[in-house]
Amino acid sequence: MRVATWNVNSVLARLPRLLPWLDERAPDVVCLQETKLSDEAFADALGASLAERGYAVAHHGQGQWNGVALLSRVGLDDVVRGLPDEPRFPAADSPPDARAVTATCGGLRVTSVYVPNGRSPDDPHYLYKLDWLAALRASVTDPATAIVAGDMNIAPTDDDVWDPALFVTSTHVTPAERKALAELTGLGLRDVVRDRWPDPRVFTYWDYRAGRFHQDLGMRIDLVLAGADPAGRVAAVWIDRKARKGKGPSDHAPVIVDLDTAPDGDIGPVVPPPSAPAPRRSRS
DNA sequence: ATGTCCGACCACGTCGGA
């Protein structure tokens, strides 16, 4: 089962990249962030194309900003939009941002998250970010079968930033944010990209400006956090840098995780074992 | 400081957000 997360920075602007990417990578479960559409507009723009490809969809959108979605072709059940008791910004009676959507897909409880940016450590939005992370942690009730994936807007360590010195006064790297993330992973969630790729300079986001992608000056802020069950079945993990290249990319690259099928589980298509004989090709 | 992109809007340029 292939699980992916991608901050698309407007799903409408990214349609010419998203649909070919789905066809090429064939993920079974996709967490999208920053769709920037209402639920109605998302259904109008993508409903038919996704149904054609076999995806069930749970979109949680608000229009101009934010917006998250889950696409799945291994089941999509018990959808929950938002987080229980999620904080609101700028005031407690403001409408909630569309930043999380959860469903059961292929036997896993998957949440697509778009953590608040924080803007700067002295901004009220930063405190909102910390509160939101606490609500996210509280929402994970069964860590063993959970996957929390998306744009965390936190670089877990200095190895996840192209130049830590430039970020000392910035959000994304502060001890409080990293502590909030550590408390989330402390539930028993593995950062599976870091497990697989322990060296520095493994990035998922590069600013559009100043040729940052070309120079590989990025950050790793898009994470796949996996509970014991999925983490124990990780077969492959990579950051799909190809999707960041070419014409009209998002500023984020997708993160892709392949899970082996459990021996007795009903969690999706079975991958043929490597020993299976290759299909004979007819010459014509 | 800031070489870009995105969506909105009393829209054809400017602005907030990232």
Image (spheres, coloured by chain):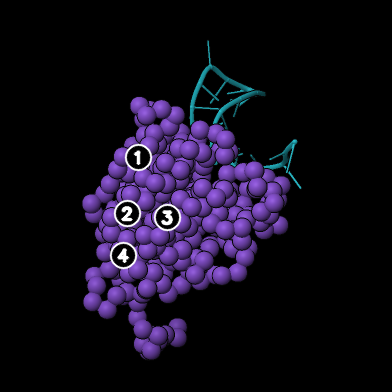
Chain colours: A purple, B cyan
Give the mark nearest the N terminus, 3 or 4: 4
Q: Residues at marks 2 and 4, common chain?
A: yes
Q: Is residue A284 above or below residue A220?
A: below
Earlier along the polypeptide chain: callout 1 or callout 2? Answer: 1
Quadrant housing residue A59:
top left
Tell me the element at label 3. Answer: helix
Marks 1/3: CA distance? 17 Å
Instruction: Say which residue label 4 marks.
Output: A144
* Mark 3 vs mark 2, CA separation in Å: 12 Å
Residue found at x 55% / y 70%:
A197
Marker disc for residue A86: 1
Residue A246 visible in this rendered orientation of the protein:
no
| Residue with the mark numbered 2 | A140
Q: CA distance from mark 1 to mark 2?
A: 13 Å
Q: Please provide percent x and percent y for residue A132.
A: 41, 42
Q: Residues within 10 Å of mark 2 (few under 14, many from 20)?
A: some
Q: Tell me the distance, in whole angstroms, between the alpha carbons under discs 2 and 4.
A: 10 Å
The three-letter code of the residue at mark 3 reads Glu
Which is nearer the N-term, disc 1 or disc 3? 1
